Amino acid sequence: MKEGSPDGLFVAAKGGHNAESHNHNDVGNFIVYADGLPAIIDVGVGTYTAKTFSPARYEIWTMQSAWHNLPTINGVMQAPGRQYAARDVRCVERGDTVEFQADIGGAYPAEAGVQRWLRQLVLDRRSNTVLLTDRFVCRSTPRELVQSLITPWPIKPVSDGVLELEGPPGASAPVVIRYPVNQFGVHIEQRAVDDPRLERSWGPKVYRILLRARTPSAQGEWTLEFTQRRG
């Protein structure tokens, strides 16, 4: 990764709260670009309709945290409102490494049963990797924990614990996702994009990777690695 060049991986993340202007329920969401192209994405907003600005706004799939790069806890997504917010947000740069950290547990309603969900993203420019680590404490053992990852690129399982995202023409290197296979089962699904505004950005469909905890526990941690396969 060279300064001033689109080569390599780039990451952006947000803290904030779920009552922002034109809000989506997406506290703790992040995106990853590879060689200047969007690989792990925020789908964005479709064409505005009356529903977009109605009490039914969060029935729209693009507004929901399950369609962002976020966990769904006990089957419960994030909720709208100023009180649903990140805590203890910080971003620190040390040489070739940048670290973002936030406790996003407060973005979930009480029925999620989460006490703390510390999300950490580390970009290492020298090794061209992004590490996502989640450390969590729930009030009791959740019945399920699912991490979503959204991409416009087709997904190829390479081996146990390794997925590869094949970018469009012009993408110089696939993005490789490594996940702990002893902790997660993986399910890949696709969703048709039937909104013209979104289709201009992503094409006719997007993909969702669902990493489902094999044995949910009341506290724990996991790490996902994003890198590129060169050559």
Image: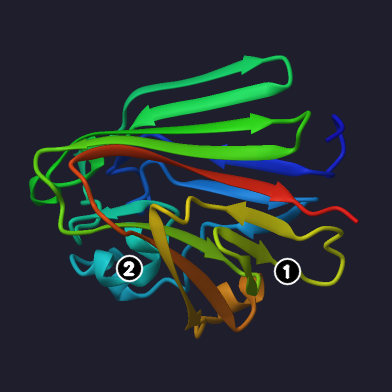
Outermost residue, top side: 94
Q: Residue at x 73, y 69 (%)?
A: 166
Query: Which residue is denoted by mark 1 in the rendering?
Result: 166
Q: Which mark is residue 52?
A: 2
Estimate the x, y position of residue 229 in percent, counting from the top left: 79, 54
Q: Amino acid at mark 2?
A: Thr
Outermost residue, right side: 231
Q: Residue at x 32, y 71 (%)?
A: 60
- Mark found first going from the N terminus, 1 or 2: 2
Q: Amino acid at mark 1?
A: Glu
Estimate the x, y position of residue 206 in percent, counting from the top left: 55, 74
User: Of residues 176 and 109, which is closer to you in this image?
Assistant: 176
Q: Which mark is residue 56?
A: none
Q: Residue at x 36, y 34 (%)?
A: 16
Relative to 57, say whether 74 is above or below.
above
Q: In the picture provided, is 62 more to the left or to the right than 105?
A: right
In terms of secondary structure, where does tag 2 sit? Answer: helix
Give the number of the mark in front: 1 or 2.
1
Q: State the image quarter where residue 124 is shown.
A: top right
